[in-house]
Image (tube, rainbow, N blue to C red):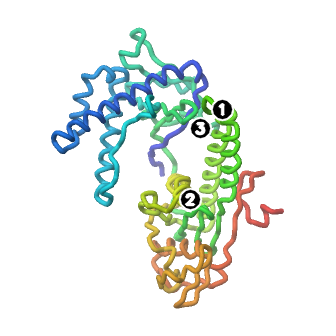
Amino acid sequence: MAIEVTRTYVGTIQNHRQVCNGLDSLGDSASKIWNIARWTADRVWDETGEIPNEGVLKSYMKNRECWKDLNAQSSQKVIEELSDAFQSWFDLRQNDSEANPPGYRKHGDTRPKSTVTFKADGFKHDPEHNRIRLSKGSTLKEHFSDFILCEYQTRPDFDLSEVNRVQNVRAVWNGDEWELHFVCKVELETNDSAGDGVAGIDLGITNIATVAFPDEYVLYPGNSPKQDKHYFTRAEYDTEGEDGPSEQSRWARRKLADRETHFYHTLTDTIITECVERGVGALAVSWPEDVRESDWGKTGNKKLHSWAFDRIYQYLEYKGETRGVEVLKENEWETSKTCSRCGDDAKSNRVERGLYVCSSCELVANADCNGAENMRQKITPSPHGEDRSNGCVAQPSTYLFDRESGMFRTREQAVS
């Protein structure tokens, strides 16, 4: 069976030096539109106590000169993003009265380079030659037919000429350079369900993922990305130039991002493959609701900021849908302190970070395995009381990331 899904593919701009000034102008204009609209919303709010809606802001901004710096649909998209930001703020205020409204896009006396979105009439795509023409607004054009022509390269295993259609294109400043994000409709062939089995995943920081399969528990430690982050972050700081990032510093930043992307793709590929081979058709993934809004102290907040739980979920979801594995997002509330065998939820059961000992049924377990089993039991028909021996939960298998092969292997294979 075929399904149509939305995918975003990143393209590296090959002629960046020729087009960067033009893209800088568009990104600056998008920030200017945002700031003026934000200032207008502020004044209306002071006078009426209400934030003007999207339609009102668009009508007002159409008369501003900066509106014509971009294609009309691109300018409208900036206002839509601002309205979405205000809506998110309204939602946050229900639980946090001190939540801050969306701010201005400004760094000191300068504006940052905002993302510019080009909808259907804002770009012309030539996938055969890997080129795309991006429109300018009338006030930035030097002549009637002026535009920005970008030559791009996507990853080797993907060809944009094979997608059903490109919905829109975003020019994104990644901190070092501009890149293109193609939002596409893609038709994928899907498999029947991989099986009737159920598995659960506990996502963490030390162990990036702990999976409770029907017949085994598997740990996937995060030692490799942690080591990469330490090495490349240090390389970045050691080569930082007085006038901003040096070429070596930018290289270190890009290299770290590439390694992280490869690690998370390999991790999620491995987990979905294991599910298919073990007949698992449903996978429950722990989802830490509002975890980023909590205060975990300086060190804890720093770790949480780099925790890629949302990225892992997204990768698992789209990889699973084509291979017959349904990936479900489940709230992880209290799964770390609840016994997966009897359901006792005494806080004292969590003896230390890696050890769980139930005071009621005397289960001794690896704490992450206990959490993963609780995730599995959220969607399995028979929750507590299954045969989970102490040896099974306390001594899981460990799969380490092997840099030489770029794959996950059992601890014995990785060490040998």
Q: Is residue 169 visible?
A: no
Q: Nearer the viewer, mark 2 or mark 3?
A: 2
Q: Residue at x 79, y 63 (%)?
A: 413
Q: Nearer the viewer, residue 11 or 59?
A: 59
Considering the numbered disc 3 on the image, is that residue within a helix, a strand or a loop?
loop
Q: Residues within 10 Å of mark 2 (few under 14, many from 20)?
A: few
Q: Which residue is mark 3?
A: 158
Q: Residue at x 52, y 91 (%)?
A: 360
Q: Residues within 10 Å of mark 3 (few under 14, many from 20)?
A: few
Name the residue at the right extreme. 416
Residue 148, which numbered label? none
| Horizontal arrangement in the rendering, residue 88 relative to residue 219 (left or right) | left
Q: Which residue is mark 2?
A: 299
Q: Residues within 10 Å of mark 1 (few under 14, many from 20)?
A: few
Q: Which residue is mark 1?
A: 241
Q: Nearer the viewer, residue 291 or 131?
A: 291
Q: Position of residue 361 (x, y in %)?
A: 54, 90
| Horizontal arrangement in the rendering, residue 86 relative to residue 142 (left or right) | left
Considering the numbered disc 1 on the image, is that residue within a helix, a strand or a loop?
loop
Q: Residue at x 49, y 20 (%)?
A: 22
Q: Earlier in the sequence, mark 3 or mark 1?
A: 3
